[in-house]
Amino acid sequence: MNEQFGIREILTNHPIVPVCVEDDPARIERVMEKLEASGIHCIEITLRSAGAFEVIQKALEVRNEGFSIGVGTIISSEQVERCATLGVDFMVSPGLTSHLADAFKMAKVPFLPGVMTSSEIIAGLEYGLDTFKLFPFNLAGGEKALQTYGSVFPHVKFCPTGGVNQEIAERILQAQNVIAVGGTWMLK
Ligand code: 3PG
């Protein structure tokens, strides 16, 4: 088992990760209902709106059993601690620093840090990590980057996010180094 507290199991169970930017707690239940109706039992609520923490709290209150609630756009240790206290199921960051890696390890909550370059992947491996958000996927080189990283880092699994649509998602989910895909396309 890697040092990410079971993120691979979560992503294997939820290979489509909807990235949600929501400011109003009153709207999140409907969003989750719609996702469940289309067979998706997971959400990544981003910290990109003023009301994000209220939205997360509401989502945790109203979720059905088996629905996994993650928080995304985590960029500070304080946010990691706050999310861990709330009891979220997983955390996602667009990047990775030594401070964030330490905070994630202290929190003991499944986490998915972001990488884009070979050096960032190597830094992640040095922290004992092997599962990353490949972000922004379209700017990282898209499917060609995935293929290349697959031969350079055969044991690393990615969740490509950024510029993914249904058609791309279906195709890249077939790749041996893709464990899940993320994005906003299914919420539009
Ligand atoms: C994210 O934060 O994961 C991305 O902004 C989602 O990108 P998309 O809107 O291109 O799917």
Image (cartoon, grey):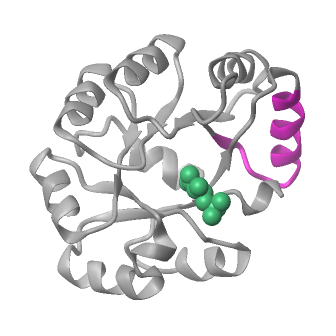
Q: Which residue, as the protein is rendered here, is positioned at the far front?
A: 50
Q: Residue at x 23, y 36 (%)?
A: 101
The answer to whether residue 32 is magenta is yes
Magenta-tinted stretch: 27-44
Q: How many tags in the picture?
A: 0
If the picture is divided into quarters, which one holds ligand 1? Answer: bottom right
Q: Position of residue 126 (x, y in %)?
A: 9, 51
Q: Position of residue 107 (x, y in %)?
A: 32, 21
Rendered image quadrant of residue 50? top right
Rendered image quadrant of residue 36? top right
Along the line of sight, the residue nearer the viewer: 30 or 155:
30
Q: Position of residue 25 (x, y in %)?
A: 80, 22
Q: Position of residue 159 (x, y in %)?
A: 46, 61
Q: Residue at x 23, y 75 (%)?
A: 154
Q: Quadrant of the C terminus?
A: bottom right
Q: Quadrant of the N terminus?
A: top left
Q: Residue at x 20, y 29 (%)?
A: 102
The answer to whether residue 170 is magenta is no
Q: Main secondary structure of the magenta part?
A: helix
User: Can residue 123 be seen in this snapshot?
Assistant: yes
